[in-house]
Image (cartoon, grey):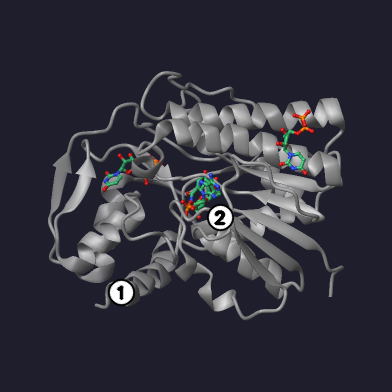
Amino acid sequence: MAENKRILITGGSGFLGSHLCERLLSAGHDVLCVDNYFTGSKENIRHLLGQPRFELMRHDVTFPLYVEVDEIYNLACPASPIHYQHDPVQTTKTSVHGAINMLGLAKRIKAKILQASTSEVYGDPSVHPQTEDYWGNVNPIGPRACYDEGKRCAETLFFDYHRQHALRIKVARIFNTYGPRMAVNDGRVVSNFIVQALRGEDITVYGDGGQSRSFCYVDELVDGLVRLMENTPDDFTGPVNLGNPREFTILELAEKVIALLGSRSKIIHKPLPQDDPMQRKPDITLAKSALGWEPQIRLEEGLKPTVDYFRRVLGL
Ligand code: NAD
Ligand code: UDP
Ligand code: UDP
């Protein structure tokens, strides 16, 4: 077994965080899960509570945190548009004050720290597929700015703490990820379409559905995060794109979900939200070479366990 470490995961009760907790516990590490349950849920980590190496703490990362760990995965931040736009000031605070506090913590205890950044730093991209050297096209005053600019500022802070205080940092730009434990009411496209199809409700495609996204299955994404933290030299900071480069239009996704479930749901169209990115697909050349990482799970395969999960939680 690899060396045992004490690892802090902020946002550990969320969708990605709960899978990361599981993964690091099964590798024999001590995991401290910190969350304020804004979008996460104790249900996501309830099955881990009995494990002696697992510890849970209710805490908001916009406030200082004094703990002793070897590594920090900073995931705390609402990730779906309806949730991060619900209290946009708090979203920016979570990204920015949260990053400052976690970086201050990492500096004091000399911990290695990973930031869950996002493809949203590219905004509505004019470069396609997106490479890490693209600076992005973000509206700084629009409804998505609290998230996009918050995450961009967090990246700035990570790189300044690295340059100014020689912190060991890792920045992952995560593209759309899906799988079990997405929140039912989270408003993201994969969860919305599956829940609508299971309930026989209309499938709500925003705009004409011609906008594209690339969807990565959660287990593979978590594997990428762990490889970035564990398997790269200290001078490898990223940013590195993590996502599945197979690109789909939203209409194609709707059709796939309907076909997979044999659902009688109809597709209806609703207005496209302001500043909704028209295309998104990661260039993962860097992740392949630096992490030896490349997603293998096709959308059709990954949707199956995701559908099973929603069937279970909806009691259908
Ligand atoms: P999620 O909403 O399920 O998880 C976020 C977690 O952070 C929740 O448990 C929430 O309660 C917690 N949180 C929010 N504000 C907090 C605060 N102030 N203090 C402590 N905890 C707080 O979302 P997710 O999909 O698991 O996303 C996890 C991280 O990955 C986020 O930082 C998100 O921006 C990033 N990310 C996710 C995706 C994706 O497709 N899932 C894509 C890009 C980036
Ligand atoms: N901080 C924290 N835990 C620690 C150390 C620092 O939460 O163990 C927070 C603290 O609130 C501080 C922030 O991190 O304001 C930034 O710390 P840093 O040492 O970089 O700056 P300063 O203390 O000078 O503000
Ligand atoms: N979307 C949609 N119907 C929904 C939810 C989302 O058509 O019920 C679209 C949304 O407009 C966007 C894409 O699906 O173009 C992905 O949306 P999501 O909120 O999942 O992620 P993000 O926009 O942050 O990539």
Q: Is residue 281 left or right of residue 233?
A: left
In the rendered structure, which amino acid carries the disc numbered 1? Arg
Image coords of residue 204 (percent x, y): 20, 48
Q: Which residue is mark 1?
A: 311
Relative depth, front residue between 1 and 298 = 1
Q: Indicate the quadrant where residue 261 lies.
A: bottom left
Which residue sits at x=59%, y=32%?
96
Mark 2 belongs to which amino acid?
Answer: Asp
Question: Residue 131, can we see it?
Answer: no
The residue drawn where x is 84% and y is 25% is 164
Marks 1 & 2, CB-CB < 8 Å contact: no
259 horizontally vs 264: left or right = right
> Looking at the image, can residue 232 be seen?
yes
Compared with residue 138, is residue 14 higher up or lower down, i.e. above or below? below
Residue beneath the point at 19% across and 34% down? 271
Q: Nearer the viewer, mark 1 or mark 2?
A: 2
- Measured in 3D between alpha carbons, the distance from the residue under mark 1 to the one under mark 2, in whole angstroms, is 26 Å
Q: Nearer the viewer, residue 207 or 107?
A: 107
**Earlier-in-chain disc, 1 versus 2:** 2
Say what secondary structure mark 2 lies in: strand
In the picture, the quarter occupied by the C terminus is bottom left
**Circle count:** 2
Q: Position of residue 296 (x, y in %)?
A: 56, 61
Dot 1, how many residues are within 10 Å of its Cα: few (below 14), some (14-19), or many (20+)? Answer: some
Q: Which residue is mark 2?
A: 35
Q: Is residue 272 left or right of residue 291?
A: left
- Asked whether mark 2 and ligand 1 are closer than 8 Å, the reply comes as yes
Residue 183: x and y, percent?
38, 59
Q: Image height check: is 17 above or below 80? A: below
Q: Secondary structure at mark 1?
A: helix
Quarter of the N terminus within the rendering: bottom right
Label 2 Cα neighbours within 10 Å, binned few <14 / some 14-19 / many ≥20: many
